[in-house]
Image: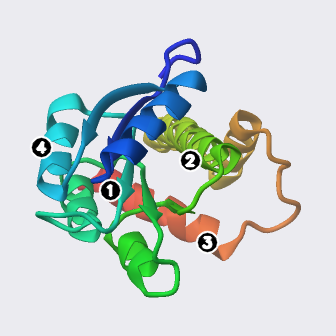
Amino acid sequence: MPASTPARVLTVEDDPIVRADLRLILEDHGFDVCAAASNGLEAVELAREHRPDLVLIDLNLPELDGVEATRRIFGERQVPIVAFTGYVGDDSIQRAVDAGAVDHVSKPFSEVELVDTLRNVLETKRLDLERAAEDHYVRIAIEAMLRENRSEKEIVAAVCRMTGEPVPPGELSVALRRSAAWLRGLLQR
């Protein structure tokens, strides 16, 4: 998602006043509330239809509770989900995390806490995507060097240059040797 594009957020809240407040707060802070659901079943459908960048979901919902809606949404698409609840004393937050939620905001909430939490979750997602792309690039480079029968030392030096890590002194680590052997095994299949 380019920095100039506002993050698309699906809000899920059964209280219409809170739902309207969430829209105002989020839009005032540069988010695009692409849809708003009032129950868990609607949340699953709207997440499928709108493909938001983030879901903010109340855990105490009619039709389908927020934990099960989280499980279903996350089962279809790995989108960051932030739980939103007034019940912090029970195990609902842990159940939401187990279902796929990455963070939570407690009710009553402060505007700053809500916005900061959503921004932090989106930044984490962005960094994870960058790391995955870098890992993919490094994996492709390693495979190419293995096909060229480069030595482990040459591969380590090249990977260190690509990642900006220092070249390890002396012997290669056991983990690195296993990784190189595993990659060679894949290439020989």
Residue 148 visible to the viewer: no
Label 3: how many Cα within 10 Å (few below 14, some 14–19, many 20+): few
Mark 3, residue position: 175
Mark 1, residue position: 186
Pick out the residue farthest to the front: 17
- State the SS at label 3: helix
- Give the Cα separation between the discs numbered 4 and 1: 40 Å
User: Residue 71: where, in percent of width, then height?
Assistant: 24, 65
- State the SS at label 1: helix
**N-terminal-most mark, 1 or 2:** 2
Q: What residue type is labelled 2?
A: Val
> Looking at the rendered structure, which numbered label has been put on residue 45?
4
Q: Which of 31 and 171 is in front in this view?
A: 31
User: Residue 171: where, in percent of width, then height?
Assistant: 79, 68
Q: What residue type is labelled 3?
A: Ala
- Give the Cα separation between the discs numbered 1 and 2: 35 Å
Mark 2, residue position: 121
The mark lying in front, picked from 2 and 4, is 4
**N-terminal-most mark, 3 or 2:** 2
Give the image quarter of residue 101: bottom left
Q: Which of 42 and 14 is in front in this view?
A: 14
The mark lying in front, picked from 3 and 4, is 4
